[in-house]
Amino acid sequence: MSRLRALWQASVNATKRAVVWNSEDLFPPSERFIFNFNSKDEVKKWHLYSDSEYGGNASS
């Protein structure tokens, strides 16, 4: 009986996720920070490159 209950609960949870609307999906925020460069040490952690290093046409 517990396997049937677990299957039922998984089905209910999947249905709830499918039905509930996420407002961020409909209206995403205007900007979202992935990383803030607040100091020179943080900037040093990054390597600047473009696809031209791999045969592409972009530059940076």
Image: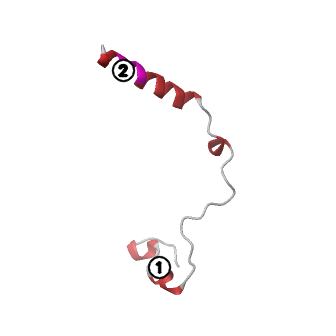
Residue visible at 59% across and 64% down in the picture: 33
Residue visible at 62% across and 39% down in the picture: 22
Q: Position of residue 12 (x, y in %)?
A: 47, 22
Q: Residue furthest bottom?
A: 40
Residue corresponding to mark 1: 48
Assess whether residue 3 is covered by the magenta stretch. no
Which of the labelled discs sits on residue 16, or is there none?
none
Q: What's under tag 2, amino acid-wise?
A: Leu
Neighbour tally class for label 2: few under 14, some 14-19, many 20 plus, Cα within 10 Å: few
- Quadrant where the N terminus sits is top left
Residue corresponding to mark 2: 7
Query: Residue 6 falls in which quadrant of the image?
Result: top left
Assess whether residue 8 is covered by the magenta stretch. yes
Give left or right: position of 39 versus 24. left
For the image shown, how many numbered marks are present on the structure?
2
Q: What's under tag 1, amino acid-wise?
A: Leu
